[in-house]
Image (cartoon, helix red, strand yellow):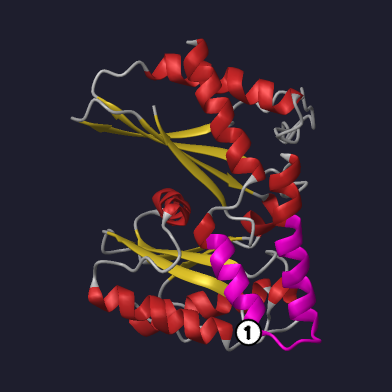
Amino acid sequence: MKNLIDKIYDLICRASCEIPEDIQSALKKAYKKEADVSPARQQLELILKNIRIAEDRNQPLCQDTGALTFFVSCPRNFDKAAFRKSAESAIIKATNDGLLRKNSVCPITGMNDGTNIGPGSPMIYWDEKASKKLEVKLLLKGGGSENVGVQYSLPDDKLGAGRDIDGIRRCVLDAVYKAQGKGCPPSITSVCVGGDRASGYAEAKKQFLRKIGERSKDPSIAKLERRLLSEINSLGIGAMGLGGKTTALDVFISVLNRVPASYFVTVSQMCWACRRRKASL
């Protein structure tokens, strides 16, 4: 049990304090695209400096260390209760050590017991497989980017969006444009087409585990991802909403089957501090 707690603690530490290489590379490319004296270049320079300091000092990348979401691929008959107990112990330790902010608050009473443990915290998604290997992926998602998530029900007369590829495109561009700098761009824009209201948000969040440049296996969806990335970056919103050539680092789209009566397009955004890590235990 202690070994598992230590492994999860280390996963939390790395997720909170270190940005994955693909995200860093994308931010550096965005920096090079901007004019020498511009708000966008200055913001990206500060972001990259912040990343270096956080890693060197083993301190959180952002004051909002986000909501903890675990995606666990486990063997059949795995003891899920034991894993949750270990994860909770690791979270409490990480919180006490300052690697996580005390983020878990009761919405009715406003009470915060300072542990980051409570109803809905942490969130754990399970995927049982025949393999005997335990793979744990952790996503830390801040409230700023979570606040600008939105779900559309098509058709949408106001947007002129029908139940087709162009309708999906209109929804995504509308969501990004309305967010402006509130989601701390440059962001990753994740989209789920279909599903129900709950599964749409869950699936969109799961797409943040993909690496920058990883395209959908469906050629038509991959084409839409590339088109939307180009169109979003042509909006000029830029780093932290201060203008520039890079508003989105990437666009990820996933598709779930729907019932005939519903056609949801769920758009979720991840701030530049895309904190995700994985470990095989």
Q: Is residue 159 visible?
A: no
Say which quadrant the C terminus sits in. top left
Where residue 127 appears, as percent x and y from the top left, is 31, 35
Within-10-Å neighbours for mark 1: few <14, some 14–19, many 20+:
few
Q: Is residue 203 visible?
A: yes
- Write the residue at 60% across / 17% down: 89
Choose top left, top right, bottom left or bottom right for residue 30.
Answer: bottom right
- Write the residue at 30% across / 19% down: 78
Q: Residue 121 or 72: which is nearer the viewer?
A: 72
Residue wearing tag 1: 33
Per the image, is 36 magenta? yes
Please, what secondary structure does the residue beneath circle 1 have?
A: helix
Task: Give the magenta range.
Answer: 23-50
Horizontal side of residue 274 vs 71, given as left or right: right
Main secondary structure found in the magenta portion: helix
Where residue 184 appears, as percent x and y from the top left, is 70, 64
Per the image, is 244 magenta? no
- Write the residue at 38% across / 85% down: 166
Q: Amino acid at mark 1?
A: Lys
Relative to residue 12, is residue 141 depicted above or below? below
Total residue callouts: 1
